């Protein structure tokens, strides 16, 4: 009988993880990273240009006048709806929705997603309220208005939902359902932004800049987390404080 050599055990690819280990998939699929970077650059450019254009102004520009007037005329008959939209983008609801996203990611062991949900919206809101508004100095009725804080936070939440829905755990959610949920999140953010214009709390260009800041912050956080990789995510570290080692 011819004795054959024992084949050495084959190494598993670096991406392999044992069953039950934390989800290590990137937030953004590889084909979407370049478009995401391009959209981030557009958001930054739009915010900077609008900020320079309206720095220190206390009145509406021609674009604001062209958009704000018909929006106010169409929606001023629905004060209850406008109040609901304004409340949706306020601090407590946004905080609760952010915590819900973080908890959902942790329950499904999507540690990078949990970091994204915990960081993107609060940092975007802080950037708007404590940096951009004082820096630009645009006012409406005596209050700093550029960018809109409501638009910033709601678009950051919607953008976070969109990124998380790109690759849900196990892909048990169909593409059509994910597209529907993403569309609903973006629609809700858009309605909040329109509601702030209709209430006379912001100019049109304020909410455009807020949407750019919120969206750009989500993309920036997602790209940074993907660049760091799952092994460098703090929530993916073992109890010893060191990054978890891949199995061989």
Image (tube, rainbow, N blue to C red):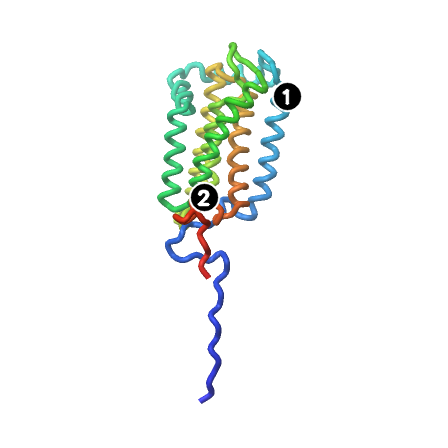
Image: 10 above or below 86: below
Q: Is residue 183 above or below residue 150?
A: below
Give the structural element (helix, strand or loop) at label 1: helix
Q: Is residue 177 left or right of residue 124?
A: left
Camera-nearest label, 1 or 2: 2
Q: Secondary structure at mark 2?
A: helix
Q: Which quadrant of the figure has residue 66?
A: top right
Assess disc 1: are there few (<14), some (14-19) or many (≥20) residues with their C-alpha within 10 Å of its C-alpha. Answer: few
Q: Are marks 1 and 2 in contact (CB under 8 Å)?
A: no
- Neighbour class for label 2 at 10 Å: few (<14), some, many (≥20)? some
- Answer yes or no: is residue 174 visible: no
**55 left or right of 127 in image:** right
Residue at position x 49%, y 44% from top?
27
Q: Which residue is mark 2?
A: 234
Task: Kindly tell me whether residue 119 is visible in this rendering.
Answer: yes
Outermost residue on the front side: it is: 240
- Please tell me which residue lies in front, 93 or 3: 3
Q: Nearer the viewer, residue 131 or 94?
A: 131
Query: Marks 1/2: CA distance?
Result: 37 Å
Left or right of 59: which side holds 110?
left
Which residue sits at x=41%, y=24%? 91
Taking the image as shown, residue 17 lies to the left or right of residue 68, namely left
> Residue 123: x percent and y percent?
49, 30
Give the vertical position of 104 relative to 59 (above or below).
below
Disc sitting over residue 244 in the figure: none
Residue occupied by mark 1? 52
Locate residue 92, reporting x and y percent: 38, 25
Counting from the top left corner in percent of width and height, residue 195 is at: 46, 20
């Amino acid at each position: 009988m011819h004795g054959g050599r024992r084949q050495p055990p084959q190494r598993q690819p670096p991406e392999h993880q044992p069953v039950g280990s934390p989800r290590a998939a990137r937030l953004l699929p590889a084909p979407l990273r370049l478009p995401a970077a391009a959209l981030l650059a557009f958001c930054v450019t739009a915010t900077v240009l609008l900020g320079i254009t309206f720095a220190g102004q206390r009145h509406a520009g021609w674009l604001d006048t062209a958009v704000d007037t018909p929006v106010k005329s169409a929606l001023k008959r629905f004060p209850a709806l406008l109040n609901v939209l304004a409340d949706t983008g306020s601090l407590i609801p946004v905080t609760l929705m952010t915590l819900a996203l973080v908890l959902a990611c942790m329950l499904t062991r999507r540690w990078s997603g949990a970091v994204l949900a915990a960081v993107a919206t609060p940092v975007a809101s802080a950037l708007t309220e404590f940096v951009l508004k004082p820096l630009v100095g645009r006012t409406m009725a005596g209050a700093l208005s550029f960018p809109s804080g409501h638009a910033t936070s709601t678009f950051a939440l919607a953008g976070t939902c969109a990124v998380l829905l790109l690759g849900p755990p196990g892909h048990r959610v169909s593409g059509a359902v994910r597209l529907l949920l993403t569309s609903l999140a973006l629609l809700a953010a858009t309605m909040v932004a329109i509601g702030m214009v209709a209430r006379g709390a912001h100019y049109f260009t304020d909410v455009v800049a807020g949407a750019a800041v919120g969206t750009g912050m989500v993309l920036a956080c997602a790209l940074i987390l993907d660049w760091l990789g799952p092994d460098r995510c703090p929530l993916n570290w073992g109890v010893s404080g060191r990054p978890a080692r891949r199995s061989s």
